[in-house]
Amino acid sequence: MHGAFADASGWSRVITHLTREGHTVVAPPNPLRGVHADSAYLAAFLATLQGPLVLVGHSYGGVLITNAAHGDVRVRALVYVAAFAPDAGRPYPPCRRSSPAPSSPRQHSTSASTRKAWTAM
């Protein structure tokens, strides 16, 4: 599964190599609708495939393969290529701020640019 700033064509050389070696390889598109929706999409896609399965994720795709593989007994391995590798069900991004962004600039003494950055998260 590709990351957020790429598409499935980034796997084309890998797909060519593995196909030549006799493996069946598919690279589904990443709909980029959010972690829960994208993980559910990938899990539904996996349900259409025959096992055993090896899932590969790059960057944000690592979160998706983790979540989509959770509980699927056909998944034999997860491969993370410069990817986020959270425990299943853990939040993404892993460094997300634990408290909510300020609701009103008057309540906090943070700068306008800091408030804007936190609000965008």
Image (tube, helix red, strand yellow):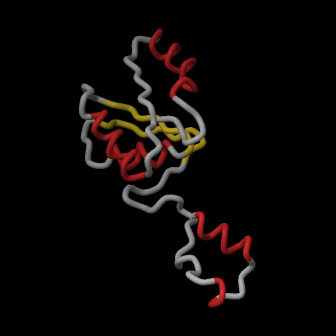
In this view, the residue farthest toward the top is 20
Identify which residue is drawn at 25% across, 25% down. Answer: 50
Which quadrant of the structure image shows residue 44?
top left
Which quadrant of the structure image shows residue 13?
top right
Task: Pick the quarter of the image with the C terminus.
Answer: bottom right
Which residue occupies the foreground of this view, 84 or 79?
84
The answer to whether 21 is drawn above or below residue 89 in the figure is above
The answer to whether 23 is drawn above or below residue 5 in the figure is above
Q: Is residue 86 left or right of residue 13?
A: left
Image location of residue 103, percent across then percent down: 56, 81
The answer to whether 5 is drawn above or below residue 104 in the figure is above
In this view, the residue farthest toward the bottom is 107
Q: Is residue 54 left or right of residue 110?
A: left
Q: Is residue 55 left or right of residue 14?
A: left
Identify which residue is drawn at 75% across, 78% down. Answer: 111
Query: Total marks drawn?
Result: 0
Identify which residue is drawn at 49% across, 58% down. Answer: 92
Image location of residue 81, percent across then percent down: 56, 38
Image location of residue 117, percent across then percent down: 66, 67
Identify which residue is drawn at 37% across, 59% down. Answer: 89
Q: Is residue 25 left or right of residue 2?
A: left
Which quadrant of the structure image shows residue 4?
top right
